[in-house]
Amino acid sequence: MTSNTAAGAGASAPHSSERTFLGHPIALYVLFFTELWERFNFYGMRALLIFYFMQTFNVERGPASESYGAYNGLVYATPLLGGMLADRIIGYRRSIILGAILMGLGEFGLTFSGFGIIPQNHVTIFSSLALVIVGNGFFKPNISTLVGTLYRQGDNRRDTAFTIFYMGINIGAFLSPIACGQIGQRYGFHYGFGLAGIGMVVGLIIFLCGKHLLGDHGLPPNPEVLKSRRVMGIRRDTAVYAGAVLLVPIAAFLVSTPHLVIRYAAPVVGAAFLLYVIWEAFRSEHAERVGLFAALLLIFFSIVFWACFEQAGSSMNLFTESCVDRTVFGYTIEASVFQSVNAAFIVLLAPFFTYLWTRLGRAGLEPSSPVKFGLALIQVGAGFVFLVIAARHATGAAKAGLVWIFLAYFFHTTGELCLSPVGLSMITKLAPARLGGLMMGMWFLSSAFAHLIGGVISSMTGREGGFEPVFKMIVYFACASGVVLLILSPVIKRWERIRLESHHR
């Protein structure tokens, strides 16, 4: 980590030559707006994607949901590779620029195919989606890491910086379904994708114009390595760029064959990771072993949570489209717009949860990590209770009221705020230093598995009975998982304590 941000200053004081705004490096706001527009791009596509699959390929809810799950699963898997290549070879800046270019090309590929500029067929569509998948792998993990490099260890501005950065994410996630979703569903998907692509271009321009404010942050870790020659005389950075291009057809094939990903690739990769971690656990000392077991249990339950939560872009999106009365004051709101509700609730509720945990912590009453995870699962299950009620109201020609959708998103968001901020911190506390990167990778990979499972769950709504039995199944499964975790929480908490005490010996 570079040290020029705070050299010669106190833990919370900026470097004397550092340009700041509201107490933070100006570079933070460059990254804030870059990420805002990248999330505008990403969530704009996500809001439309399930409808795009169904209408472009003329398929039913089941196959469309599986393709949607495979796409999102791959989106959450590629950051493992992108983060590693940035750390070791090309640095964070180049990774962000490469990722932004690839994602923009993917969005405009979908746009141009819709306008007939290029053929609209399986090759162009899945190649465009693959460009977004690979681009996200280079962009997403590295811009967050770059924020952290702006502050040295012990700088008490760091947490506030990530809070500011997190707000940028949610502003982009809030605005994009409203803009891209409404325009895309009303006038044509290619208009929505084009608007999302423009957002990515804006984010890239902001980053390129402001990168001089980053100083030496995010540069390649060893510039000499980039000049070294490898196989056939290709420079290492050139090899990374070429590799990114070669990944595109592989990702296109995988997203076009979701059954292969779900039935074969994901189980094999997941089993390999799990067996390796268990092997490492049994060859570790007791404190490390129980820490790994605690982390594995919480990772498992996080998969359950996200598989339920991520119904938002698939089954909940489809339910809102077909079964909910979306007319307000005579104006019909497109279903994809409601993807912004979660982001809006996060912006509104995050300060309250921060205050709540702080107050409970001071009183010695803050719930442990496993208890928070258990409460999160029960809350996401409670959200689906309202969707079950809504599904019962939507019989025949009748439509369910919007209030049920808002109540579902409210409880899903409170659950997210119990679980999401805890996860990364939990991994860093419980994993041995030698396995820190592996366990962090497994945490992110768990989100990929959750999206794949979520796609399978959503596909069940295409069977006889429709939405209600699937939503009811989610209620039972999520709430039961939450109760089981609450029962296990004393054991997991004891394992956590053993692991944390070993840090201080």
Image: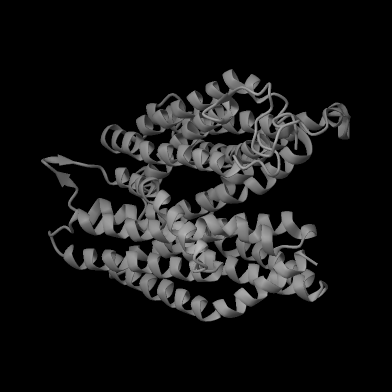
**Residue at horizontal 87%, vertical 28%?**
224
Point 62% across, 65% down: residue: 267
Q: Quadrant of the N terminus?
A: top right
Q: Could you tell me if residue 327 is visible in this image?
A: yes
Q: Nearer the viewer, residue 112 or 373?
A: 373
Q: Please say which color scheme the image uses.
A: one colour
Q: In the rendered image, is residue 453 in sight? A: no
Residue 212 is situated, as x and y percent measured from the top left of the image, at 65, 19
Question: What's the residue at 26%, 35% (across, down)?
Answer: 186
Q: Residue at x 62, y 39 (%)?
A: 248
Is 290 in front, or is 93? 290
Total residue callouts: 0
Image coords of residue 104 (percent x, y): 52, 29
Q: Is residue 328 above or below residue 222?
A: below
Residue 221 falls left or right of residue 443 = right
Q: Residue 277 falls in which quadrant of the image?
A: bottom right
Res 151 quadrant in image: top right
Q: Quadrant location of the C terminus?
A: bottom right
Q: Nearer the viewer, residue 360 or 194?
A: 360
In x, y percent, where is residue 282? 79, 75
371 and 505: which is toward the camera: 505
Residue 229, position in %: x, y?
A: 88, 30
**Vertical comparison of 408 with 116: above or below:** below
Whether 204 is drawn above or below 176: the answer is above
